[in-house]
Amino acid sequence: MPTLKRTQMYFPEEILRKLKRKALEKKTTVANIVRDAVSELLKKEEVKNWNDDPLWNMVGSSSSKERDLSVNHDKYLYGKNR
C-alpha cells in the first residue's frame, strides 16, 4: 500500500452527513470513500493511449477514390447532402 499523506478538506454539512452515512453503510471511513472517488475521477481523466486502441489501428487501412469523404460522408453513406 502506498504511503498516505495527511490533508485537510472542507465539505458542506449536507455532503459530509451523506459521506458519513455512506461510510457507515459500507463499514469504511469517509477518507476511504473520498480516496476511491478521487482515484476514479483521475482514472477517467487520464490521457488515452491511442496506440492500444484497436480502432486507432484501423486508421489508414482503407482507401477510396473519393477525396472528400470527411466533408461528404453522409452523402456517401446515406445518400444525403449536408
Image (spheres, rainbow, N blue to C red):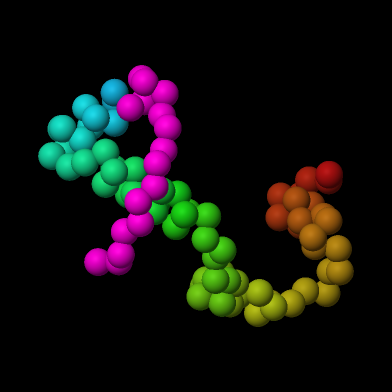
* Membership of 14 in magenta stretch: yes
* Membership of 7 in magenta stretch: yes
* Residue 18, above or below 78: above
Residue 48 shows in the view: yes
Q: Which residues are magenta?
A: 1-16
Which residue is at 80% across, 62% downward?
A: 69
| Residue 79 x, y percent position in the rendering | 76, 49
Which residue is at 39% across, 47% downward?
A: 7
Q: In this image, 33 relative to 51: left or right?
A: left
Residue 37 shows in the view: no
Q: In this image, 61 relative to 40: left or right?
A: right
Q: Residue furthest right?
A: 67
The front one of 57 and 25 is 25
Quadrant in which the N terminus is drawn: bottom left
Which residue is at 21% across, 27% downward?
A: 21
> Hey, which quadrant is residue 29 in on the image?
top left
* Residue 67, above or below 5: below
Quadrant in which the C terminus is drawn: top right
| Residue 50 x, y percent position in the rendering | 58, 71
Which residue is at 36% across, 20% downward?
A: 14
